[in-house]
Image (cartoon, rainbow, N blue to C red):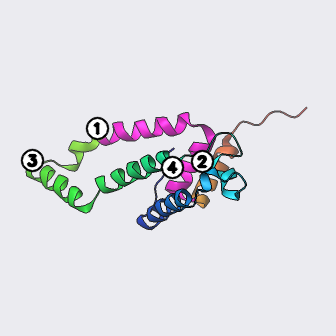
Amino acid sequence: MLLSVSTREFATILAALRYWQANERNTASEAVEYDIASDGGQFEPLGNDEIDALCEQLNVRATATSEEQMARLLEKADAAGLEPEDLDEIVHEFAASIAADVNNGGLDDQIRYLIDGMGVQQTERQLDELIERQPREEEE
């Protein structure tokens, strides 16, 4: 699943994970949130060690795109005389791998990805257009 969130949303997600962990909600099966975290009992919610690992992974990814690192990489590309079209193939290949992951996730991942990228209204318009173009079965 690919998710794009703002810095504010990201901070809230981390805070919610830490709150969940600190208040031992992951072991309180009577808690309403337990049902969400276990997908209705399909699996056990993340334990404290798993939450630590997830938060660390999220923080590493967040800091990997810090402004300082972005500036350093831009400076490096500039110094090498790279032009935007020089990166076209790399960007296309990376975007194609994301698209493949989303498409392999089925309708749920595809629609969620489209909503994240285009918003609900544009996604619905696109779906309506697609549905309209679908061949209709002949009624007997």
Reading the image, the residue beneath label 3 is 80
Give the main secondary structure, helix, strand or loop, of the magenta stretch: helix
N-terminal label among 3 and 4: 4
Bounds of the magenta segment: 91-119
Instruction: Name the one closer to the observer, 120 or 126.
Output: 120
Identified by mark 3, the residue type is Ala
Q: Whole-percent x and y of residue 31?
A: 70, 57
Instruction: Examine the rendered structure and indicate whether residue 80 appears above or below residue 140.
Output: below
Reading the image, the residue beneath label 1 is 89
| Residue at (87, 34) in percent of width and height | 139
N-terminal label among 1 and 2: 1
Question: With 48 as the anchor, is 64 left or right in this view?
Answer: left
**Residue 8 tag number:** none
Front disc: 1 or 2:
2
Check disc 4 and report its element: helix, strand or loop.
helix
Marks 1 and 3 sit apart, C-alpha to C-alpha, by 17 Å
Reading the image, the residue beneath label 2 is 111
Q: Whole-percent x and y of residue 119?
A: 55, 59
N-terminal label among 1 and 3: 3
Residues at discs 1 and 4 in contact (Cβ within 8 Å): no
- For label 1, count other residues whose C-alpha is less than 10 Å away and answer few (under 14), some (14-19) or many (20+): few
Q: Is residue 42 magenta?
A: no
Q: Is residue 92 magenta?
A: yes
Spot the residue most to the right: 140
